[in-house]
Amino acid sequence: MESKIYCLPIKTPDGIVNLEINHTVVDKDDDDMSVTLSTTIQGETLSYQTETTEEALILLAKNLPEKWHIKSCISCRHGHFCPVGNFDNELFCVTDFAPKEPRDLWQVTENEGERKSRSRTLFDCCDHYQTQAEDYFTYSDYYYEVTKCK
């Protein structure tokens, strides 16, 4: 079992709020993992147990107060998952070009040096942050899941 506390930036109508997130991963074996994500928002404790960190953050995003939005790599247009697989809580920052399809990400996720320099957690955020949009390709289900499946 591995537990870590993250500070997750949330955009609110009053500005940025940093939520303290307790992230626990229980890796039972190679194909069986459990992720628990918990936090307190406006006095209410929220907790989600899923198979991946991505799923837990999507559930959190869907249950945030109105006009609150996660502002981290998982919701950034430059945060892409690997087309041939990634570790839990990992995506890749691509700010130097605009991929148009998954195969455009092959070099940056399969070259060991590129992969290492671009790897981020889903909780990270940088100065290049831009919100995902329907008209901009991001290799991630986050935008669809949060905006279309609410």
Image: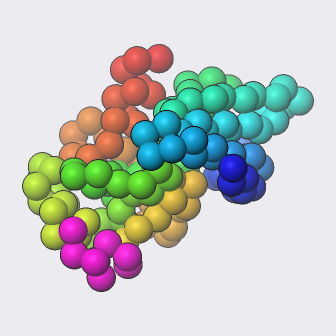
Across the whole image, how many numbered discs are drawn on residues?
0
Task: Point out residue 93 in the picture as x, y percentages from the top left corner.
Answer: 36, 65
Task: Point out residue 24 in the picture as x, y percentages from the top left corner.
Answer: 68, 46
At x 35%, y 54%, the residue is 86
Residue 133 placement, left or right of 32 = left
Residue 50: say if magenta. Answer: no
At x 51%, y 67%, the residue is 126
Task: Point out residue 139 in the picture as x, y percentages from the top left corner.
Answer: 26, 47
Residue 6 placement, left or right of 135 = right
Of residues 93 and 49, the one nearer the viewer is 49
Residue 114: say if magenta. Answer: yes
Residue 90 quadrant: bottom left
Task: Point out residue 115 in the picture as x, y percentages from the top left corner.
Answer: 32, 72
Residue at the farthest right position: 43
Residue 44 quadrant: top right
Residue 27 placement, left or right of 118 = right
At x 51%, y 44%, the residue is 29
Of residues 131 and 140, the one nearer the viewer is 140
Residue at the farthest top position: 150
Task: Give the residues in magenta.
Answer: 110-117
One can see residue 18 in this view: no
Residue at the farthest bottom position: 113
One can see residue 35 in this view: yes
At x 22%, y 51%, the residue is 83
Secondary structure that dominates the magenta span: helix
Residue 86 placement, left or right of 2 = left
Of residues 11 and 100, the one nearer the viewer is 100
